[in-house]
Image: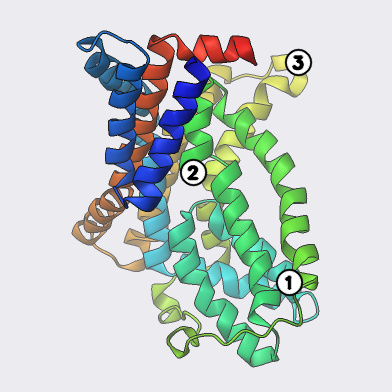
Amino acid sequence: MTLTLVLLCIAGLVVLISVCKINAFAAFLLTAFAAGALLGMPLAQIPKSVEKGLGDTLDSLALVLCLGAVLGKLLAESGAAQVLAGALMRAFGVRHIQWALVVTGFVVGIPLYYGVGFVLLVPLIFSIAQRYKLSAIYIGLPMLAALSVTHGFLPPHPSPAALAVQFHANMGLTLLYGLAVAVPTIVVAGPLFARTLKGLAARPLEAFAGAPTPGPAAQVPGTANSFFTALLPVLLLAVAAAYPFVAGGRLPGQAVVALVGQPSVSMLLAVAYATYAVGLRLGKTMPQLMALFAEAVKDIAMILLIIGASGALKQVLTDSGASAEVAGLL
């Protein structure tokens, strides 16, 4: 009976979001309260479970996601993302254009959220397709596969970061395992699958026909600076995860590395560096940069609330005993 009620609640959540078009945050909250009542929780206990689940989920996640949004905003507004894409296209050439777009999507997708990366890179796909007379699907799918995989598998993106928190996993190891799974996934879902769609005709909208172009050279970061800034959080997390295993863990500075390996600290350091490297150094003022910070946090606010509300539903299922019962059935 419990499993049936849980499945009914999940089905109701899907209906609220997809059929009734209710905001996912509100849908999760409504489902959490309904689940608590259906599963026999004392009514006065349900709000406490909801609040606890929301708070626990966002406890260590809010900083990571907000700082990740700020880093992505800085890279997008400074032109660093476009610089990355252009450098990779020049390095790979036309013959290996698919792989150039895969690496572009992967590098841009690590610090930027999917929506931002998509808006930045889709015009580039259409521009390349027109220039080299190639199918937009054939060259675009590998890039979008890379964007999707980074968004789904790698911290600091919302889903993998939230799952790492809920399962009490090490964020650095989660990133390393995510990279191990991400590479073959991108190869199969991107270049290999796209070859089967090479003959599909695609007519891009004229509004997207032009590639994004950075401003004057003096106002955009250099290629090395763009790569380093975009990958800095990944580098910090990866080094911190691997450091304890080097030389049997006898290297100096373990405490400092452990501090830097905390996701919130690594993201804070990356944002601090980006504020200077692709902001102040390129002539932007501190008020301009702080305005970008505010815009970035606004962009991520609803995602944070949705993740928090999903944690509220999880807590209701835990406190009602439904999680333990379902686990026993499985």
- Name above or below for residue 40 compared with residue 191: above
Q: Disc 1 versus disc 3: distance between alpha carbons?
A: 41 Å
Look at mark 2 in the image and give the residue it sits on: 157
- The 10 Å Cα crowd at callout 1, few under 14, some 14 to 19, many 20 or more, is many
The answer to whether the residues at label 1 and label 3 have Cβ atoms under 8 Å apart is no
Residue 25 shows in the view: yes
Q: Position of residue 31 (x, y in %)?
A: 33, 31
Between 207 and 47, the one nearer to me in the picture: 47
Q: Nearer the viewer, mark 1 or mark 3?
A: 1
Look at mark 3 in the image and give the residue it sits on: 248
| Residue name at image x 49 percent, y 62 percent | 117
Q: Position of residue 89 (x, y in %)?
A: 66, 75
Which quarter of the rendered picture does the C terminus lie within? Answer: top right
Mark 2: amino acid? His
Q: Is residue 329 left or right of residue 122?
A: right
**Element on which disc 2 rests:** loop
- Name above or below for residue 312 compared with residue 149: above
Q: Disc 3 versus disc 2: distance between alpha carbons?
A: 31 Å
**Element on which disc 3 rests:** helix
Between 225 and 304, the one nearer to me in the picture: 304
Look at mark 1 in the image and give the residue it sits on: 98
Residue 67 shows in the view: no
